[in-house]
Image: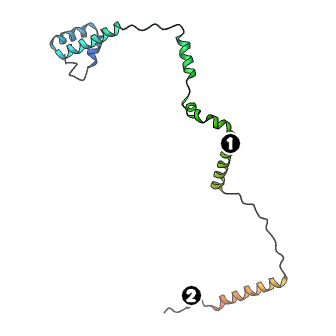
């Protein structure tokens, strides 16, 4: 048998032996190994001492009202949020209206800054123009068209 305290394949084998959870054949093999291996026998002795100390330990009696008292204590505990708000709670009660108004103002300002102020659509205005103004505008357009015809195309200009 390989030594369970030195090998990595079965270190819990010694714990199972101490708790008397091993089959008889395996327990007999391990017992023979314990007579030869001092490290394993010390580990088993220490573990058996722990088990016997735990057996001597007596749990206290639970009172008949334990469950009720436990649930009352759980119900009385404050959440982290209520402990955080507790110092400023009186101010929140007194300033509730202004606080809500300030919050709405900040939200509105954020929306306006993000999306901008909606622009009003202006109706198209129609100007009344005198007939003489139309004639002068048409004459100016004809004059500009004559400038276009007097300049030769770029391909006919000699390069320098």
Q: Identify the residue position indicated by label 2 in the image.
A: 154
Q: Looking at the image, how many numbered discs can be counted on the residues?
A: 2
- Residue 95 picture quarter: top right
3 w.r.t. 125: above or below: above
Q: Which mark is residue 100?
A: 1
Residue 13: image quadrant is: top left
| Residue drawn at 58 percent across, 31 percent down | 82
Q: Nearer the viewer, residue 128 or 141?
A: 128
Q: Nearer the viewer, residue 114 or 74?
A: 74
The quadrant in which residue 75 appears is top right
Asked whether the beta carbons under mark 1 and mark 2 sit within 8 Å of each other, the answer is: no
Question: Is 114 located above or below residue 93 in the figure?
Answer: below
Q: Nearer the viewer, residue 81 or 115?
A: 81
Outermost residue to the left:
36
| Crowd band around label 1 with a 10 angstrom C-alpha radius: few (<14), some (14–19), many (20+) | few
Q: Residue at x 71, y 57 (%)?
A: 118
- Report whether 131 appears left or right of 116: right
Q: In the rendered structure, which disc, 1 or 2, sits on the residue that comes first in sequence?
A: 1
x and y, in percent, of residue 30 in the image: 22, 12
Q: Nearer the viewer, mark 1 or mark 2?
A: 1
> Image point 68% across, 42% down: which residue?
100
Instruction: Give the Cα separation between the discs numbered 1 and 2.
Output: 71 Å
Q: Is residue 145 left or right of residue 135?
A: left
State whether residue 5 is above or below residue 81.
above
Residue located at (24% from left, 11% from top): 45
Residue 131: x and y, percent?
84, 83
Q: Which image quarter is the N terminus in? A: top left
Q: Mark 2 Cα within 10 Å, few/some/many (few <14, many 20+)?
A: few
Percent across and percent down for residue 153 are 59, 88
């Amino acid at each position: 048998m390989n030594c369970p305290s030195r090998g990595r394949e079965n270190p819990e084998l010694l714990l199972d032996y101490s708790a008397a959870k091993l089959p008889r054949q395996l327990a007999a093999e391990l017992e023979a190994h314990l007579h030869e291996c001092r490290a394993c026998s010390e580990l088993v002795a220490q573990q058996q001492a722990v088990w016997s100390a735990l057996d001597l330990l007596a749990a206290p009696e639970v009172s008949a009202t334990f469950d009720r008292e436990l649930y009352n204590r759980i119900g009385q505990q404050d959440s982290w949020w209520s402990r955080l708000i507790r110092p400023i709670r009186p101010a929140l009660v007194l300033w509730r209206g202004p606080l809500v108004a300030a919050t709405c103002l900040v939200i509105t300002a954020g929306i306006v800054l993000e999306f901008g102020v909606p622009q009003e659509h202006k109706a198209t205005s129609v100007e009344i123009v005198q007939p003489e103004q139309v004639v002068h505008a048409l004459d100016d357009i004809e004059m500009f068209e004559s400038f276009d015809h007097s300049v030769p195309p770029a391909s006919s200009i000699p390069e320098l």
